[in-house]
Amino acid sequence: MTRRQFFAGALGSSALLLDSLHASDAQFRGVYPILQTPYTEDDAVDLETLAEEARFAARCGVHGMVWPQRASQYQYLSVDERLAGAEALKKASQGLAPKLVIGVQGPDLETAVRYARHAQKLRPDAIIALPTRDQGEFDLAEVERYYAAIAHECDLPMFVQTTGNMTVEFVLGMARRIPTLRFVKDEAGNPVSRLVEFNQARRGGRPEVFSGNHGRNLIDEMMRDVAGNMPATGWVDLYVKVWDFFQADEPDRALAVFSKLLLFVEQAGAYGFPTLSYVLQLRGVFHNHHTRGNLPPLDGKALESLRTTYEFVRPELTA
């Protein structure tokens, strides 16, 4: 073999690897709900109900599922609860179509590394991580060291969730330096304008951009080729319908369903995390709508309003 043939072969292998990665990334698209954390009446994490929530999400037609993140109240879960929950979901997801994404963020690098090592052994489809806190200004060099350490311990595809001062330019730079950083869930700044920035400046199709924010801008984001959205689970079948109608070039039907899911989104903004659990209770998935963190409970009027919305949108629900 000549030197030229050797290098041609090497370059060809690299191209095949990149093509394989791009094909793999293309499988991560659609609606990936953040699973809510169910609790027993004595405030323990209800692992059996968490597993049932995963099966419920699959019946709703979701493309993936994520736990634990902000909407899972991850900051109120112990290390042991998070490890046990991840294991319960891995077991429950066997044979289900949706991909499983496990959160590995921690309040410090050492804790995140522990979760990453556990994920490396557990082998979900991907991992996701917030930085060491939910919001605020960060030392971006420190943030990159944090994500690089996670990637060093776990070779699975990684979602980075943005917050605070994590700019588009910063995330794109990290993606060039951290090979497993394949996706971003972007919740820092204006999601629509930042989506355009990401798509114009990224290299080799990385990172693919998912949105959050309860899918408030999902129609506008799909018009700009968002890879997916990570909403709450309670009314996730509505998001799936919106996604599927839009992909099928039926925008009017997508808008009709979207207008209904926004009713729940507005109520979630008014009443907070208990809303998410209560809708799952209404749907027979959760046994209660208990949350942690001393959040204001839903009063009688809130419960009545949520029940009214549930009955109104019920004909559109699929699970």
Image: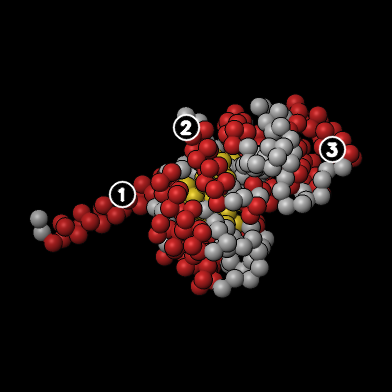
Give the residue type that dot 3 points to.
Leu
- Under circle 1, the secondary element is helix
Give the residue type that dot 2 points to.
Gln
Q: Pointers 3 and 1 in contact (CB under 8 A)?
A: no
Residue 137 % position (x, y): 63, 71
Name the front one of labels 3 and 1: 3
Q: Nearer the viewer, residue 101 or 37?
A: 37
Dot placed on the residue nearer the N-terminal end, 1 or 2? 1
Q: Please give the name of the residue rendered at 47% of the width and 29% of the height, measured from the top-left corner.
A: 95
Label 1 sits on residue: 16
Give the residue type that dot 1 points to.
Leu
Position of 69 relative to 53 (above/below)? below
Query: In this figure, which colouring scheme has been used for the structure?
Result: secondary structure
Q: Please indicate, yes or no, whether residue 239 appears anywhere in the rendered image.
A: no
Dot placed on the residue nearer the N-terminal end, 3 or 2? 2
Label 3 sits on residue: 303
